[in-house]
Amino acid sequence: MIILPDGLQTANELLKTFSIVPRSQWKGSCLRILLLNLMPEKQITEADIVRMLDSCNDDIEIIPMRIDGQQYKTTSQAYVETYYMAFESLRNGEYDGLIVTGAPIEHLPFEEVRYWKELCTIMDWAKSHVRSSLYICWGAQAALYHQWQIPKYDLSEKMFGVFPYECLQEVALLRRISSPFNMPTSRHTEVRSIDFPIHNELQIVSESQEAGVGIAIAHKGREVYVTGHLEYAALRLNDEYQRDLSKGKAIKTPRYYYSEMGSPLFQWQDTALQIYQNWVKCYVCQSSNNLT
């Protein structure tokens, strides 16, 4: 069961597909996962995350969280302030999981992001208040930079498509995952394996010859860094492609994504659901991974 804030529009739209209940109607215990949603179209990302976590067969409350004092352009300010809880109101609690999404601000140095200081505070806070944190795309790059001083590099063209990633190590996150596995990737920057410290606490566990570092984990799953978008729905890359074309941007067709007939191929669904299930079962629920 997925527990969501009362009245959340995404919840109403997904009721026919997923097992969703409003927070006020839920009386039992559940896992509590914070969602720091930095993506511009917040309701689309909400639906993506619900789809991933609904497959875990656990009772999970998703708590949308916002950074205090931010202004929003692509999602109404009223929507965010109504359904997303301010970090300051949550910081005294302890939580099972945290998901930090990507953000379309790769062109900016991290220190020039308007909420960089607040984001660093949240990432530091999570080390002692969250059992496992999952960082996605730009969120992964931001966390690797802040926590491990690993820089990001501009790419000459967008890394865009569904790329094969090899499993490099046997870790709980990749249980039941065949190697190579497909992962949607959509970014203008990258992190490089050469910059990763030789340190047992941080490990690259999947990598692509074409797309580079895929997934890394630290502190036995306390932090998980995913540079792609496993959560994407089948048409998401197509929507991004059409959006960029309509804006006159120089964008190439997403690689390994369309069939010979020109229709999108949903090649990553089973892998994505399995990795999210592994994250929840092995790291978020892991009682031996106690908060410190």
Image (cartoon, rainbow, N blue to C red):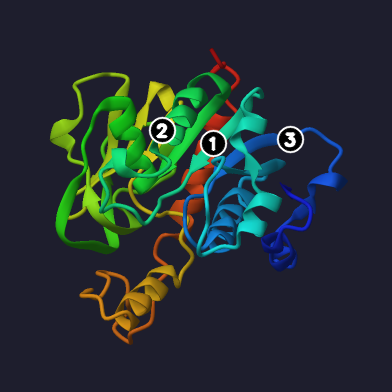
Frontmost of labels 3 and 1 is 1
> Could you say which quadrant of the image residue 192 lies in?
top left
**Residue beneath disc 3:** 30
Q: Position of residue 98 (x, y in %)?
A: 54, 36
**Residue beneath disc 1:** 98
Q: In this orientation, which residue lies closer to the viewer: 146 or 71?
A: 71
How far is the residue under mark 2 from the one under mark 3? 31 Å
Q: In this orientation, which residue lies closer to the viewer: 286 or 194?
A: 194
Sort mark 2 into few (<14), some (14-19) or many (20+) by Cα contacts within 10 Å: few
How far is the residue under mark 3 from the one under mark 1? 14 Å
Q: Amino acid at mark 2?
A: Lys
> Could you say which quadrant of the image residue 206 lies in?
top left
Q: Position of residue 109 (x, y in %)?
A: 25, 44
Q: Report whether 65 appears left or right of 251.
A: right
Q: Secondary structure at mark 2?
A: helix
Residue 58 visible within the image: no
Residue, far bottom: 261
User: Which residue appears at 35% of the width and 47% of the height?
Assistant: 138
Q: Position of residue 241 (x, y in %)?
A: 33, 75
Q: Amino acid at mark 3?
A: Cys
Q: Amino acid at mark 1?
A: Leu
Sort mark 1 into few (<14), some (14-19) or many (20+) by Cα contacts within 10 Å: many
Check if mark 3's residue and mark 1's residue have beta carbons within 8 Å.
no
Q: Earlier in the sequence, mark 1 or mark 2?
A: 1
Q: How many marks?
A: 3
**Residue beneath disc 2:** 117
How far is the residue under mark 1 from the one under mark 2? 18 Å
User: Which residue appears at 67% of the width and 32% of the height?
Assistant: 89
